[in-house]
Image: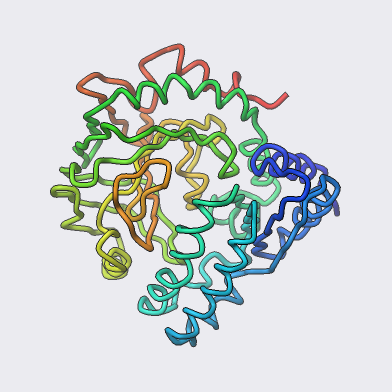
Amino acid sequence: MKDPRNETLANILLTYSADLQPGEKIMLDIRGKDTLGLAQEVIRKATEMGGIPFWYYNDPSLIRPWIQAATEEQFQAFGQVHLKLMKEMDAWLCLNGPDNPFELADVGSVQLQLYRRLYTGPVHLQERVRNTKWCILNYPTDSMAQLAEMSREAFEDYYYEVCCLDYASMSRAMDPLVEMMKKTDQVRIVAPGTDLTFSIRGIPAVKCDGKYNLPDGEVFTAPVRDSVNGHIQFNVPLLERGILFRDIKLEFQEGKVVHASCQGDTKTLKEVLGVDEGARYAGEFALGVNPFIVRPMKDALFDEKIAGSLHVALGNCDEETPNGNESALHMDIVLDQREEQGGGEIYFDGELVRQDGRFVDERLERSLSAEALRYR
């Protein structure tokens, strides 16, 4: 049955996120059968707008047998063809709703490292991120509802609420936070199990206001590469390549992760951080500000936007916030600092700017509230 809310999503994706213009080529990366209804709306509207849509079906259930069997030469050839396609595109949308998010859980780490190095790195981190208008949308599925521990119906209602907000108002409300971060040198993060310091001096601050992700709502920058020192304990589970990591703890010395552990599969976590030299350095620091995302869902695209959270990404830095770190990895790990999750503080140059997930500046806190950003 056609869901009219998909028309709203398709409209946001094409007119706001991708800003599709007549004659532009746009690639749809379709993952999971549940996304097909939205894909149909996007293809229809893109064509009506004068764009030229391309699409392919890319569910992990198809990726898994290939990654398991492919040689280095096959990974390289696969990456080269996809790189040529990506170079032709003006825009790229990922409609991500895999039938089973754990499909890659038992794929060997050596094979996954080849996949990241010869496909993800050149095609997505180097070409797509730098040279296209792109956006990733995680679509509601049974598996997402299960991970969020919600019924499918309740989860769908929640999903459309957190995705379909007033992004133009959010964008304006983020401006004071962007200016504050631009002026900051030293950042200190304090929370249970956490005391981390680093510099963001000279690195831009960028707002994520619905252009690159749906849902959206963060302001990000990057630590000066060698400035990160201390320890941090993340309290939001991370689902990475089909493996669920809980209670990740990292210790930094002069920018580099010198110790990493988690509940469960610490061995695999260390293998992920061993993909290349840059994987052990931070490529991003961000504050989440989406007031409609109120619970962790084991989905980084949602969890990193929780108002009152922060995240640190290990690996490749974004082109907009260059700190010199390059890697085939970009892995966002989230710390929720709301009072009910243990609380915490963020200091900019010694001044408290956020306490237990709430901004000290009342005007900033109010302008980023649910009431101010509700879609009308």
Q: Is residue 15 left or right of residue 172?
A: right
- Give residue 146's quadrant in the image: bottom right
Residue at horizontal 62 percent and vertical 57 percent from the top: 96
Q: Is residue 107 left or right of residue 213?
A: left
The answer to whether residue 43 is above or below residue 4 is below
Q: Is residue 78 above or below residue 58?
A: below
Q: Nearer the viewer, residue 337 or 119?
A: 119
Picture quadrant where residue 211 is located: top right
Image quadrant in which the N terminus is located: bottom right
In this view, the residue in front, 264 or 188, is: 188
Residue 134 seen in this snapshot: no
| x 37%, y 60%: residue | 329
Can residue 61 be seen in this snapshot?
Answer: yes
Q: Give the residue furthest to the top.
A: 363
Q: Residue 179, percent across and down?
A: 39, 22
Number of labelled discs?
Answer: 0
Expressed as whole percent of the image width and height from the top left, the position of residue 12 reads 70, 39
Position of residue 42 measured from the top left corner of the image (x, y, whole percent): 77, 51
Question: Colour scheme of this structure image?
Answer: rainbow
Where in the figure is residue 21, as x and y percent of width and height? 74, 43
Nearest to the observer: residue 284 or residue 22 = 22
Q: Residue at x 46, y 12 (%)?
A: 363
Q: Which residue occupies the foreground of this view, 239 or 21?
A: 21
**Residue 89 falls left or right of residue 347:** right
Please say if 176 is above or below 148. Answer: above
Instruction: Determine whether, in the image, residue 16 is placed left or right of residue 129.
Output: right
Looking at the image, residue 290 lies above or below residue 143: above
User: Looking at the rendering, in which quadrant would you find the C terminus?
Assistant: top right
Q: Which residue is rendered at x = 56% and y = 26% of the image?
A: 170
